[in-house]
């Protein structure tokens, strides 16, 4: 991996004796503590990581903030925030390494999309973005709302669309349009979530390369460790990282995806 290579999507979960899961959740994950994630980064040769608040903790960001506090130079974070949060609390989060807020349309425990515009206005002053976990087949209806937001948008897992839908699906084509317009980022991640063929996930290649053709400066890579809420065999993180070389065969563009784009999006080096 090149210096500064970044995993832009992972979750730190537990230990549960310190950080309790909320009752209203869609799944119950195993513990995935900070030490295990740090070991993953070291094993893969990644210098930096982005810890994304999982839905199982709701709007209690204590576990995510604890990870950031222990690795201020190495980690950044994405929070899930209650709409009633104060400006002072948001400012403290910004100082502790939070760089965006997540809205989750696929699992319980998040914040309703009803608050999308309000949250965007609240976070604009910090230079944060809105991160969306959604199925991009819903994007044609949602795109007009996104276009009016004062902040950038980050879409998880290549739009979380099953590969069986095809790259010509109107929702995926809408995602490509959003990327080309320059206000939307996409995470090249979740191959095991969207593939219908399974390992080595070759059916994901057309989707990744269509996004690359749209704009390589708006893409980042993520491991999605520890792969929560997945039925079936567990993905191998080394194989997922190796897949990036197939998705993005040009070395210069891979450097963008792994190093330069994450540094710009998450403020590494600030």
Image (tube, rainbow, N blue to C red):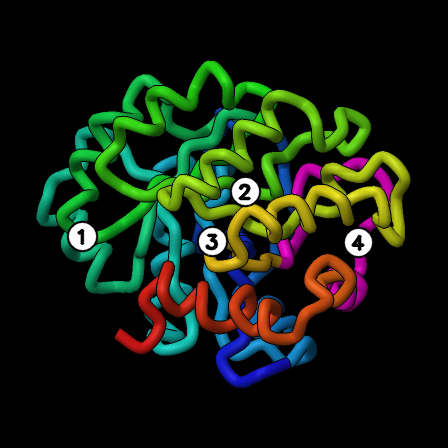
Q: Please tell me which of labels 2 and 1 falls first in the chain.
A: 1
Q: Is residue 103 above or below residue 256?
A: above
Q: Position of residue 54 (x, y in %)?
A: 50, 43
Q: Is residue 26 visible?
A: no
Nearer the observer: mark 3 or 1; the answer is: 3
| Separation of residues labelled 3 and 4 (CA atoms) | 25 Å
Residue nearer the viewer, 171 or 35: 171
- Looking at the rendered structure, which numbered label has been put on residue 51? none
Which residues are drawn in magenta?
223-242
Identify the residue position indicated by label 2 in the image.
156
**Where is residue 99 shown, x and y percent of the image?**
31, 55
In the rendered structure, find residue 235 and report the number of the disc placed on it: 4
**Could you tell me residue 218's position as x and y percent?**
47, 53
**Mark 3 and mark 2: Cα distance apart in space:** 12 Å
Please rate how many residues cluster around mark 2, counting C-alpha atoms within 10 Å: few if below 14, some from 14 to 19, many from 20.
many
Q: Residue at the location (77% across, 67% down)?
A: 242
**Residue that badge 3 annotates:** 218
- Tag 3's secondary structure? helix
Q: Pointer 1: what residue?
A: 126
How dense is the environment of label 3, judged by Cα within 10 Å: few (below 14), some, or many (20 and up)?
many
Q: Earlier in the sequence, mark 3 or mark 2?
A: 2
Q: Nearer the viewer, mark 4 or mark 1?
A: 1
**What residue do we see at 45% from left, 71% from top?**
260
4 or 1: tag closer to the N-terminus: 1
Which mark is nearer the camera, 3 or 4? 3
Disc 4 from disc 1: Cα separation: 35 Å
């Amino acid at each position: 991996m090149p210096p500064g290579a970044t995993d832009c999507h992972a979750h730190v979960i537990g230990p549960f004796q310190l950080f309790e899961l909320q009752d209203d959740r869609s799944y119950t994950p195993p513990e995935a503590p900070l030490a295990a994630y740090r070991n993953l980064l070291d094993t893969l040769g990644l210098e930096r990581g982005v810890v994304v608040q999982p839905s199982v903790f709701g709007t209690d960001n204590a576990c995510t903030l604890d990870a950031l506090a222990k690795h201020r130079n190495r980690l950044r974070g994405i929070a899930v925030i209650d709409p009633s949060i104060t400006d002072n609390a948001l400012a403290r989060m910004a100082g502790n390494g939070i760089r965006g807020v997540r809205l989750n349309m696929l699992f319980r425990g998040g914040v309703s999309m009803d608050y999308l515009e309000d949250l965007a206005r609240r976070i604009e002053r910090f230079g944060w973005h809105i991160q969306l976990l959604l199925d991009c087949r819903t994007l044609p209806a949602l795109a007009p709302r996104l276009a009016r937001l004062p902040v950038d948008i980050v879409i998880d897992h290549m739009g979380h669309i099953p590969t069986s839908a095809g790259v010509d699906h109107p929702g995926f084509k809408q995602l490509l349009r959003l990327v080309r317009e320059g206000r939307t980022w996409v995470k090249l991640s979740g191959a095991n979530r969207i593939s219908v063929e399974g390992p080595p996930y070759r059916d994901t290649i057309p989707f990744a390369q269509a996004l690359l053709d749209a704009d390589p400066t708006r893409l980042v890579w993520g491991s999605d460790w520890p792969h929560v809420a997945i039925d079936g065999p567990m993905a191998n993180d080394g194989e997922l990282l190796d897949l990036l070389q197939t998705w993005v065969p040009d070395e210069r563009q891979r450097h963008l995806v792994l190093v330069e784009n994450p540094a710009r999006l998450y403020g590494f080096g600030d």
